[in-house]
Image (spheres, grey):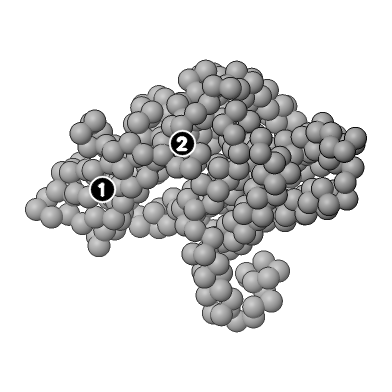
């Protein structure tokens, strides 16, 4: 069963080996979502209760803790479930990115939420200086792991963040995306294999695809509920053919995104994130998922009418997240161009279409 199962039009399967994990994540996410109704705003604040629950259950560092025995499939279930309930926590940043990169670089990281600041810079006079832009959740994290790309490869180290070095910003959904200026002695950074930087970006793109599917499923569920409950001209909106067609179109777009994201999850589970199979699958997923975000979020707001654009209604928690995440770790256009280059350089483009990269 797909790790991303559970959409509004889906059904539970008795063959779901991860049913207990799925239920646990859903319970924690739903509890957080219900507690925050009517109190969410811009910018977002870290949900401390949700983070403590994720930590206590082992979900906060599911794959970056060796003895957990979890892999991409379990991580995808956690990311999807938290995103479907608009959880205000840096789960992807802590587990899939900072936790993993810290282990690869041999850096011991503190407990608590983590994030990664990615930047381009070169050592000058024994110091590495620059600015990491739009760092997710930096102001709320116990540690910020700096990943600097330069002519001499990738350097990694824990960044000392001060109020003077940080400029607080946020994305459309209000999630923290802070700019951090850094000036670090080069010998404080660990030089690691440059391919880890490529994998880091791939992991980030993969995680965002999974999270977007969760957000779109939530938007679809709200749209179905609203059209069933809203009475117009003596009958519910869902009884009108045009509304039914819009809902069907949303479902088709979301299922296309789910199939592509599930392809990327399966590739990572089977081959690891450092595989060219996963690279291909994530590229496909980023393009497919990114292209449906606009149509699905537009349809959701159209179906809700005026209430859907108010801060009081929860729809924005999901549509603005999906729109913001679509541009993280590479835009849809960037990955579409990359996919085109892969097709042009393939011995047989049909192999690329079928995923046969042998």
Q: Quadrant of residue 237?
A: top right
Residue 218 vs 195, above or below: the answer is above
Image x and y of residue 335, in percent: 52, 64
Please give the name of the residue rendered at 12% of the width and 50% of the height, measured from the top-left corner. Answer: 126
Give left or right: position of 293 versus 115. right
Give left or right: position of 104 versus 263. left
Please give the name of the residue rendered at 70% of the width and 31% of the height, measured from the top-left corner. Answer: 22
Residue 58 vs 246, above or below: the answer is above
How many marks do you count on the picture? Answer: 2
Q: Which residue is mark 1?
A: 131
Residue sticking out furthest to the left = 125
Identify the disc placed on residue 175.
2
Q: Quadrant of residue 301?
A: top right
Please give the name of the residue rendered at 45% of the width and 26% of the height, measured from the top-left corner. Answer: 45
Q: Residues within 10 Å of mark 2 (few under 14, many from 20)?
A: many
Q: Secondary structure at mark 2?
A: loop
């Amino acid at each position: 069963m797909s790790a991303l199962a559970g959409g509004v039009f889906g059904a539970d399967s008795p063959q779901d080996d991860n049913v207990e994990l799925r239920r646990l994540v859903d319970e924690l996410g739903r509890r957080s979502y219900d507690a925050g109704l009517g109190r969410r705003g811009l910018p977002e604040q870290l949900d401390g209760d949700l983070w403590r629950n994720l930590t206590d259950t082992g979900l906060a560092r599911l794959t970056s803790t060796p003895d957990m025995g979890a892999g991409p499939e379990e991580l995808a279930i956690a990311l999807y479930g938290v995103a479907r309930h608009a959880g205000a926590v840096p789960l992807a940043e802590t587990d899939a990115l900072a936790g993993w990169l810290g282990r690869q670089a041999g850096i011991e990281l503190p407990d608590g939420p983590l994030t990664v600041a990615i930047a381009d810079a070169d050592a000058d006079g024994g110091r590495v200086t620059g600015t990491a832009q739009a760092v997710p959740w930096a102001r709320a994290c116990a540690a910020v792991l700096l990943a600097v790309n330069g002519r001499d490869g990738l350097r990694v180290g824990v960044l000392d963040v001060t109020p003077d070095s940080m400029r607080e910003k946020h994305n459309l959904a209000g999630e923290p995306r802070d700019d951090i200026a850094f000036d670090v002695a080069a010998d404080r950074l660990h030089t690691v294999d440059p391919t880890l930087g490529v994998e880091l970006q791939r992991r980030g793109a993969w995680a965002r695809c999974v999270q977007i599917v969760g957000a779109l499923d939530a938007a679809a569920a709200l749209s179905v509920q609203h059209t069933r409950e809203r009475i117009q001209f003596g009958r519910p909106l869902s009884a009108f053919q045009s509304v039914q067609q819009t809902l069907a179109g949303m479902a088709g777009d979301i299922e296309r995104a789910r199939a592509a994201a599930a392809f990327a999850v399966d590739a990572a589970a089977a081959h690891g994130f450092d595989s060219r199979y996963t690279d291909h699958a994530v590229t496909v997923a980023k393009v497919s998922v990114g292209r449906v975000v606009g149509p699905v979020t537009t349809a959701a707001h159209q179906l809700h009418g005026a209430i859907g654009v108010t801060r009081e209604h929860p729809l924005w928690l999901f549509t603005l997240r999906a729109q913001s995440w679509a541009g993280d770790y590479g835009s849809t256009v960037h990955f579409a161009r990359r996919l085109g280059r892969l097709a042009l350089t393939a011995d047989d483009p049909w192999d690329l279409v079928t995923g046969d990269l042998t």
